[in-house]
Image (cartoon, rainbow, N blue to C red):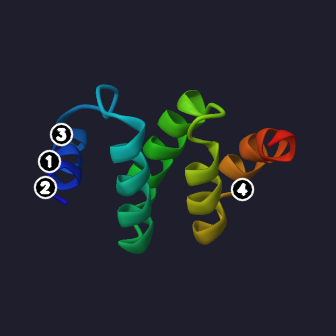
């Protein structure tokens, strides 16, 4: 949790470019629950660029639970191949 909170603070003063996909995914879920659209959008852009076959199932799960249509659209073709 501390890493996620630190990243949220860093985002407030800059960007979230230097974080792991795992932390970005956790931050996406947290900020969705907190209704922070700006940070959700930032995480979505970051995850969009980082999706690959090794992490698509985790991103797919988060995208479905948050109803994030952008991430669902990106993940769907990859999930279909698995």
Within-10-Å neighbours for mark 3: few <14, some 14–19, many 20+: some
The residue singled out by tag 1 in the image is: 6
Q: Quadrant of residue 32?
A: bottom left
| Percent x, y of residue 53 | 66, 34
Disc 3 is placed on an element classified as helix
Label 4 CA crowd tier, 10 Å (few <14, some 14–19, many 20+) = few
Q: Circle 1 — which element? A: helix
Mark 1–mark 3 Cα distance, whole angstroms, equals 6 Å
Q: Is residue 75 left or right of residue 56?
A: right
- Marks 1/3 in contact by CB < 8 Å: the verdict is yes
Where is 78 relative to 49, above or below?
A: below
Answer above or below: position of 59 versus 30. Answer: above
* Whether label 4 touches label 2, CB < 8 Å: no
Above or below 28: residue 78: above
Q: Residue at x 25, y 41 (%)?
A: 11
- Report the residue at 36% width, 65% height from top: 30
Residue under label 4 = 69
Asked whether disc 2 touches disc 1, contact meaning CB atoms under 8 Å apart, the reply is: yes
Q: Which mark is residue 10?
A: 3
Per the model, the C-alpha gap separating discs 2 and 1 is: 6 Å
Disc 3 from disc 4: Cα separation: 26 Å
Q: Which residue is mark 2?
A: 2
The first of marks 1 and 4 along the sequence is 1
Neighbourhood count class around disc 1 (C-alpha, 10 Å): few under 14, some 14–19, many 20 upward: few
Residue 62 picture location, percent across and down: 56, 60
Observer-side mark, 1 or 3, equals 1
CA–CA distance between discs 4 and 2? 28 Å
Q: Please tell me which of labels 3 and 4 falls first in the chain.
A: 3
């Amino acid at each position: 949790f501390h890493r996620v909170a630190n990243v949220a603070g860093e985002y407030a003063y800059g960007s979230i470019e230097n974080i792991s996909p795992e932390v970005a995914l956790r931050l996406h879920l947290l900020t969705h629950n907190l209704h922070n659209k700006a940070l959700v959008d930032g995480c979505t852009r970051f995850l969009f660029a980082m999706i690959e076959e090794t992490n698509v199932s985790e991103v797919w799960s988060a995208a479905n639970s948050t109803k994030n249509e952008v991430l669902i659209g990106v993940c769907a073709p990859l999930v279909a191949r698995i």
